[in-house]
Amino acid sequence: EDSQGKESDEYTHTVRVNQAPTVELPYSNPDKKQIYVYTGENTDLTFKASDDTTVKDLYLRNKGLDESDNASVYGFTIGKVTNGAVASGDGTVSADKRTATIKMVGVTNLRAGQKWTSFIEAKDNDGVKSMPANEAYNVENDYELRRRKPGYVEFIVKSQTDKYDIKTPTEKVAVTDPANVTEADLAKVKEKLQLEYKQDNDDANIAKDSAVDKNGKIQSVTKDGNNLVVTYTDGSKDTKPLSEFVTKDTTAPAKPEVKTDLTGKAGTKDPVEVSAEPGSTVELFDKDGNSLGTGVANDQGVATITPTKDIPVGNVTAKATDPSGNKSDASEPKVATDTTAPAKPEVKTDLTGKAGT
């Protein structure tokens, strides 16, 4: 009726159209609807569903008529929302039930290069699915059609080599012989070694300029001839020339320091301690530049030198030579002194009748 109480000839009807739920997936390659998982590393993916009223169910499913989870057999735990609540695994449901999430976590048991297809699907309270009910899931022979389906995802398994790279160092390790890197040299290279994300990996889920924490990602660092080989925890490898990481040591050692007090040591072959670069050969010199003996500094940087001849009175200095042949400046001198009184003398001449002469 109108405002005058008369019947109106026109009626307005409002009909609510039930919108299908929508799903959001963290695609590594959105164009191909692919998500990458990496061997040897924990996968942690979140799938989200939204609806204008209620997200009743949210789950990962197989193709065709098979709605069962087809990814758990590959090493993952996958959340599931049923009747508006998290039924298993990790997931969330908002207070108004209009959004829900499920997680897929775990380490894949597949090898790099393997893949499989799943769908992330949501249903509302009316049973309307995010994938339209009349659309087929079996579209194996039509890739373009398949990847346009809501919730479709092709999981691609990649190795850690596909994800990481050995970062070129900003500072090389100084070694005695770059053509013959020792295990001690290799240990220093390993200590400085850094990783970065592989720049030609098109995974949209990775910020390729961000830093990489190498802890827990490297199984071993070895050398193969003149190459550095990094083996990741999944067994995949990266190889780079060792020349990118080592350089010839041309730095002279710091000048050593004679530690022994040489007071009273002149005329003896008593050992002399010298502080010097660990591994360097230390040589003692007298005031005239003559060698008194040599020794090698231990890991604590101490060389003990036993002179090969008596130490003369005067200045004693030391010089260090590292394994690369680099020589240090001479140490500050220490003075060797003689504090031993001479033996009492003996008058040998017979002085009979010598008085007055």
Image: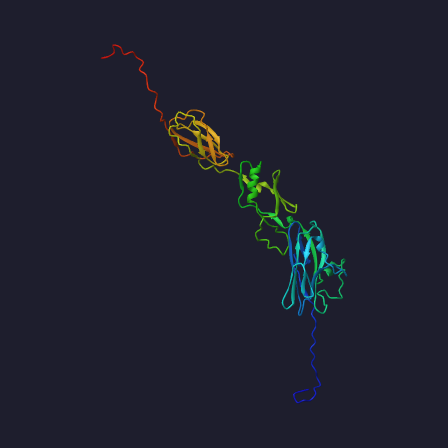
Q: Position of residue 353 (x, y in %)?
A: 25, 10
Vertical relation: 294 (above or below) 167: above
- Residue 308 image offset from top left, x and y in percent: 45, 25
The foreground one among 203 and 4 is: 4
Colour convention of the picture:
rainbow
* 59 sits to left or right of 210: right
Residue 245 visible? The answer is: no
Depth check, front residue: 300 or 196: 300
Looking at the rendered image, the quarter that the N terminus falls into is bottom right
Query: Residue 70: which quarter of the image?
Result: bottom right
Is residue 218 in sight in this rendering?
yes
Asked if residue 315 is positioned above or below residue 237 in the image, the reply reads: above
Name the residue at the left extreme. Answer: 356
Residue at 69%, 55% in the rendered image: 155
Assign the C terminus to one quadrant of the image.
Answer: top left
Q: Is residue 19 above or below residue 335?
A: below
Query: Which of the 4 image quadrants contains residue 69?
Result: bottom right
Q: Is residue 339 above or below residue 244?
A: above
Viewer-side residue, 44 vs 96: 96
Query: Residue 228's x, y, as percent?
Result: 60, 41
Judged left or right of residue 104, residue 140 is: right
**Residue, x 71% and y 55% (percent of image)?**
72
- The image quadrant that residue 103 belongs to is bottom right
Q: What number of labels is visible?
A: 0
x, y percentage for residue 13?
70, 79
**Residue that sits furthest to the top in the current view:** 353
